[in-house]
Image (cartoon, coloured by chain):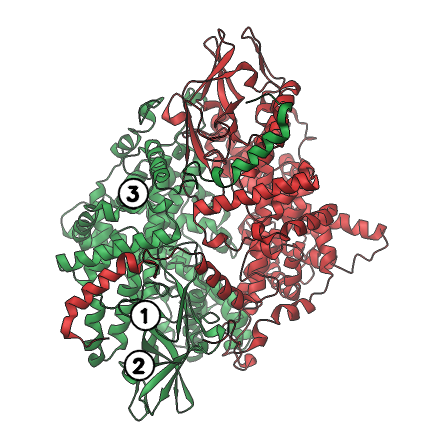
Chain colours: A red, B green
Amino acid sequence: MPPFIPPFSDPSKTVSSLSSERALVSFPVESLTRFLHGDNLDRLRSIRAEIERIPEVFSNADKPFLSRERSYVRALEKAAKLVEMKKKHKWSEEEMLTAMMQVGDSTPQFLHEALFIPTLKTQLSDEQQKTWLPRAENYEIFGCYAQTELAHGSNLRKLETTATFIPESDEFEIDTPTLNSMKWWPGALAQSSTHCAIYARLILHGKDYGVHPFLLQIRAPGSHAPMPGIELGNLGSKIGFNTIDNGFMRVHKVRIPREQMMMRNSKVTRAGEYVPAKNAKMNYSTMVAIRANIVRNAGYALGQALTIAIRYSMVRVQGGDRLPSQQGQELKIIDHGMQRYRLTTSLERASSPQFEERDPGRGGPYGGGENTILHLQTSRYLLKTILQALKTKDLSAVPVGLRSALQGGHAFEDERCTIAPGQPITGDALIAAYWHREARVLQEVVTKVLKDGAGEEAFAKSQVQMVELSRTHGEGMLVRNFYEAIAKEEQTAREQGRDPSKGFLPVLKMLCELHGVHRLLEQFGDFTLDGYVSRQQIVWCKERRDQLINLLRYELVGLVDAFDISDNQLNSAIGRYDGRVYESLYEWAKYGMSIMEKGSQGGVLGFDEVLKDVLAEGRRINGAATPKL
Amino acid sequence: MPPFIPPFSDPSKTVSSLSSERALVSFPVESLTRFLHGDNLDRLRSIRAEIERIPEVFSNADKPFLSRERSYVRALEKAAKLVEMKKKHKWSEEEMLTAMMQVGDSTPQFLHEALFIPTLKTQLSDEQQKTWLPRAENYEIFGCYAQTELAHGSNLRKLETTATFIPESDEFEIDTPTLNSMKWWPGALAQSSTHCAIYARLILHGKDYGVHPFLLQIRAPGSHAPMPGIELGNLGSKIGFNTIDNGFMRVHKVRIPREQMMMRNSKVTRAGEYVPAKNAKMNYSTMVAIRANIVRNAGYALGQALTIAIRYSMVRVQGGDRLPSQQGQELKIIDHGMQRYRLTTSLERASSPQFEERDPGRGGPYGGGENTILHLQTSRYLLKTILQALKTKDLSAVPVGLRSALQGGHAFEDERCTIAPGQPITGDALIAAYWHREARVLQEVVTKVLKDGAGEEAFAKSQVQMVELSRTHGEGMLVRNFYEAIAKEEQTAREQGRDPSKGFLPVLKMLCELHGVHRLLEQFGDFTLDGYVSRQQIVWCKERRDQLINLLRYELVGLVDAFDISDNQLNSAIGRYDGRVYESLYEWAKYGMSIMEKGSQGGVLGFDEVLKDVLAEGRRINGAATPKL
């Protein structure tokens, strides 16, 4: 056979492609990376370097080839090594969370570090924390968060698990009385955890006080066997996160000491008296923090996807060889118009959440997430603010951009978009357009809700419109935040004596303009329906979008490099930094075969077990009728 | 522990939900099933019944829990059993393909039956077929289709594998000379196949005659070891189709007899003379047929997804319990407006391809597939027709709906939509609207292409616009086909003395109207930009969409039942016909645990290997500081 990596038919096609692309980027990538990551960058990189010095544990290369069970064990190995490193390097908890992000793989440790420990901190009293926090922080116990039940998820009011106070023994009896009330889905519940925070209805002297958190031991030390009365199991494979053991749990009348009710907020005394929390919502604060984390991860995942897609599109050539201008050579696929359009208009989406994160206090729909419940919550908040303002005639709580719509009449109807054909589109014009669109949608929803009585039933009848309102609100907010972040950085540059018309800012401004224009065009009917944006302005927006996509063509690789995702985090043969995609695919597949299951007789998997007999029977049937092969 | 399936807190919530829903369906589901499946239904059902009589082979219940390797072996077992059944029941080849669909799982057999054998039939000469067809049809050999290379996919002109004629020995020498030219992706290549159809550049006396098909033996009979000079491997896991062994192959100067060039179309004589095919495209006919198959499968997959989602949405209750009208009871999630909206507007999409299939001769973009290359081919065909018509002034080849746009002037500009607010929206109004929209988009693309010189470079510059044109063409075609299929069935009903205003037709007409209205609203700017559809008409379309969604509410379960997908094909705990979703989830997870890998000491997986030491170290650190657990 030829050597391990045979020569390319034309080496210039791959190896050098990314370096020649990088030479064309107009801005210093490192400065954009610093802008995107902020002050944390150096610490993050040094932690990542520590991790990537131990490839025998932290290499993700085997991930695509492992069974669900092996993926889980490998993830535990990574978690265990992080625990060791945390102790050795004396990492703070925040550094530990940073380290977990740098691994480029999810592990059951996430549930312990980011859900269980924060729950102990926010739900246990100071006294209780003294007992439990050292155990959790030194990994004497490993914990998870058991809230969702088989038949009950988002609507926490209807959870069925009970914790009944037994005055005689000063205990609670935890019970999942029905199939539907079994805990279902919690990560790290199936195999990893020794303890969990369990949410159950507090029953005192026959009266139901609603859902509260308790601490429950679920596995015995030493053997890791389920505790008596507790049945644990694994849900099986999922679309994602197969490194984590999502599980189920049935609890049959298991007693715990009263002190294992988490009593930082609500309490039960020895006499069985209930002392309510000052704010009942505090019982769920951990879950709210986790949702913000999901948004951050979504932005990161999109950044990974774009890094892979853009790098590969600059290495892979295909078609276009019949174009006279190509003289028989194929085009890089990034230079096919449709591919460039798709990737560039996705890149602005991947970049924008990075800004939103920096201003988390602002509220809103968590960066355009599709989760209907979050949309409805956002929209409900907006509508309640508006309905209150209409009642009191006090518009001070209403965002300025929406006020003209509420005042109504010509002032709003006659508003017209200020986009000027032939010129770059200004942030002011785009921001105003998104406000106007949101105001128009708001008018429609408010009219409908008022017609239906403005109560809960009215909201329930307007879900589709409310989701639309929330979507328009979120999209407008992203555009405003993107422009604000740029303006702020321009100010910083000027204060530091740098020229804001140099470096990465002009490129980021183009990306920001593209963001605003492209989202407008995606739903342009929203903007033209009432005549706010004219047909001529739409034509110009399309031309400008094409211009911006072309202007950004040679910045793309720099923009994704600036996300600063390492090859091990990316774990992609076709997305790797050096662009050696074909060698990588081949070597990686061969490595995968080396750890793949063999046939039962040591031969080809499937042949020994099944195909051998099928083919032998075929030979028997054909017999002498066909010549021997 | 309580018994295996403990009682529900409220049994009425689940078990009876689907039967009570089914009681409300207005039409006979069986008659719609017959309409959707046509005459093949009874045969299909009897084959499915044969298959489902053998659950020990054909049950798909273990699928979610298996490793990639085990999934593959299980798929081979299903394939082998089908081979046995084919011989026993003397199934025709068409019946075998039907049987493969009824299994509800993909197997490597698909490549043999649907790609390899058809390639033998369309590419081998009659003489060659006598030698090879019996071998393939009796499974003495097992084959696949090796066309795509590591660096070459859709652009077949650039494939690099060579087949060089060696006059001395009357052989071809097959070679993949570079890393980039390795065959990469073919299904069933890695482990299953003994032979493949390999596409390679024909080289005669140093001259390159382009890509042609050859028959290559890749594994030895008996041992199944790769033939000398051939390296075979498996790509590893994929997002889907992990039951199939997609692989790679390097071929290092392997000789085959000249007779193993597939000579039905092009030929090479003993003297090394080339005899070209009458139509060079015939060399690729199998691949074109497979694309149509992909569209059919996409419609089937969407039907499966909707069956699961709609049934589950009628069993699962959540939230809404604070609505005064609900008196503390939670709503079925189908009765949340946003969920009903999403599912109903997806259902019309799942239903429409069924009709399109019935008229495959029509061409077009294969039912709205997102594949850019198919879009560009469709659009290129349309544009070439139009440009030719503009040149010759002969519009006869141009679809009638597009002619007014080409004649231009007031006739087109002054067209107005005939949707009448307050009344059901007619098929004529919708069809005309889709034609008008397509014509407007066409005008824009033609103008742009003409400005850029109307050649290949002009097409290359207009990819984004061409994809838009193809999309508008496909959407219009779906609306027309849907209405045509209904009109035809109404005619049939009248001819057979049935009343077309009874049965499933009124429901299907609502679904068809919803299809047209919803797709219009999704991109309503396309229709309003030139004033064709008015703002008032859009308001009415939205109201009508809401009406239709409400009118269809109690038909939904009947509409998905009519797809007639069996529980084993669906393989979904939450989508099963009887609605017992929670029991099923629990039993299925427990079954999965019974076949799951155990820990190395027979205990909990992960604990023996990793966690034991982590927790022991935690206990050691905490030592006497914390009381014993």
Q: Residue most toward the bottom?
A: B271
Q: Amino acid at mark 3?
A: Leu
Q: Amino acid at mark 2?
A: Met
Local secondary structure at mark 3: helix
Place of residue A118 in the rendered image (x, y in percent of width and height, measured from the top left): 61, 30
Say which residue label 2 marks: B261
Q: Quadrant of the C terminus of chain A?
A: bottom left
Q: CA distance from mark 3 to mark 2?
A: 50 Å
Q: Identity of the amino acid at label 1?
A: Arg
Label 2 element class: loop
Which of label 3 and label 2 is nearer to you? 2
Which is more N-terminal, label 1 or label 3? 1
Q: Which numbered disc flags the more N-terminal residue, 3 or 2?
A: 2
B591 lies left or right of A387: left
Marks 1/2: CA–CA distance: 18 Å
The reply to whether callout 3 and callout 1 are in contact (CB within 8 Å) is: no
Judge by depth and name the residue closer to the eye, A35 or B511. A35
Relative depth, front residue between B240 and B41: B240
> Disc 1 designates what residue?
B219
Mark 1 or mark 2, earlier in chain: 1
Instruction: Find disc 3 in the rendering and name its residue.
Output: B559
Q: Mark 3, chain letter?
A: B
Q: Is the residue marked by circle 2 packed among few (<14), some (14-19), or many (20+) residues within 10 Å?
A: many
| Disc 1: CA contacts within 10 A as few (<14), some (14-19) or many (>=20) | many
- At which x and y percent is residue A353? 63, 47
Q: In this orientation, does residue B454 appear?
A: no
Could you tell me which residue is drawn at 56 percent across and 80 percent down? A325
Residue positioned 39% across, 92% down in the render: B205
Residue B305 is situated, as x and y percent measured from the top left of the image, at: 36, 46
Chain at tag 2? B
To the question of a shared chain for discs 3 and 2, the answer is yes
Q: Are marks 3 and 2 in contact (CB under 8 Å)?
A: no
